[in-house]
Amino acid sequence: MDYSNRSIDRRHLLRLGWYSALGLATVGPLLEATKSAAAGSVPASSSLSPEAALDRLLAGNQRFTRHDPQHPDQSEGRVLELAQGQHPFATVLSCADSRVAAEIVFDQGLGDIFDVRVAGNIATPEVVGSIEYAVELLGTPLLMILGHERCGAVTAAVENGPLPGEIGTFVEAILPAVKQVKGMPGDEVDNAVSANVRYQVEQVMRSQLIRDRQQSGQLQVVGARYDLDTGLVTLIT
């Protein structure tokens, strides 16, 4: 066995305890293979510090708000470069609202952002699992939870009326944040948008994987708000 194979075996043994604790020891080798395939030959996101990753993301938003985008990483060459793997430098949990597409508002391109989108930017177990994949297996150094002005999902939670189909499921995930700011001065929906970002950050941070990455200095977790009128992203946590 060569040196590279011995390194893979050591990483597998270190991770085995974690997978066993989750009852997933049998899929440990599969996840290791997934990590290897996902990495490919694209330059590693770990080469960026969490602070540099945040600076890169916010610099892109500044270009967007100045109407001077660079549209990076969207060439035919970039498509070919990513064909065998990915190393996004940021994970963004944002609302599924059509006006808040992360690659556009941060002026990024293919392979730059691991984009998790759901109405109300809520951290359900499935969403947290997606984030864990990006943080642990792809090694993204930055995680942003991004809410936005006049969010329809948050508005529905503030109004808390009957809704058709399964629409009410995301309302339930936002209601705790709404209760935190009930009766506060100012616009109720706007207050709830910011409260929901902070609340979803708390839900994400319940993940041991994410906490471990943050405590080791390999990951920065931030909450932010997107202004629909200006296109500006502002950090709130």
Image (spheres, rainbow, N blue to C red):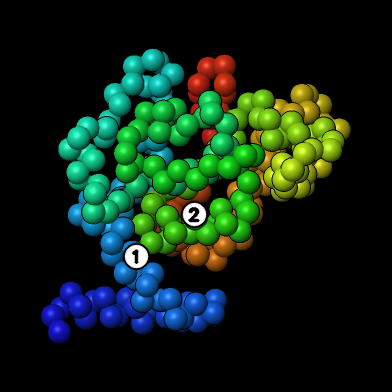
What residue sits 49% from the left and 55% below the top?
Answer: 130
What residue sits 82% from the left and 32% below the top?
Answer: 159
Q: Quadrant of the N terminus?
A: bottom left
In this rendering, the label closer to the viewer, 1 or 2:
1
The CA span between labels 1 and 2 is 15 Å
| Element at label 1 | helix
Residue furthest to the bottom in view is: 1
What residue sits 69% from the left and 35% below the top?
Answer: 153
Residue 150 in percent (x, y) is at: 67, 25
Name the kind of residue labelled 2 in the image: Ile
**Residue 98, quarter of the rendered image:** top right
Asked if residue 38 is positioned above or below residue 190 in the image, the reply reads below
Callout 1 crowding tier (Cα within 10 Å): few <14, some 14–19, many ≥20: some
Q: Which residue is mark 1?
A: 34
Residue 193 in percent (x, y) is at: 68, 34
Q: Which residue is mark 2?
A: 131
Residue 223 visible in this rendered orientation of the protein: no
Q: Earlier in the sequence, mark 1 or mark 2?
A: 1
Horizontal side of 93 relative to 136 (left or right) equals: right
Horizontal side of 202 relative to 214 (left or right) equals: right
**Residue 9, quarter of the rendered image:** bottom left
Callout 2 crowding tier (Cα within 10 Å): few <14, some 14–19, many ≥20: many
Name the kind of residue labelled 1 in the image: Thr
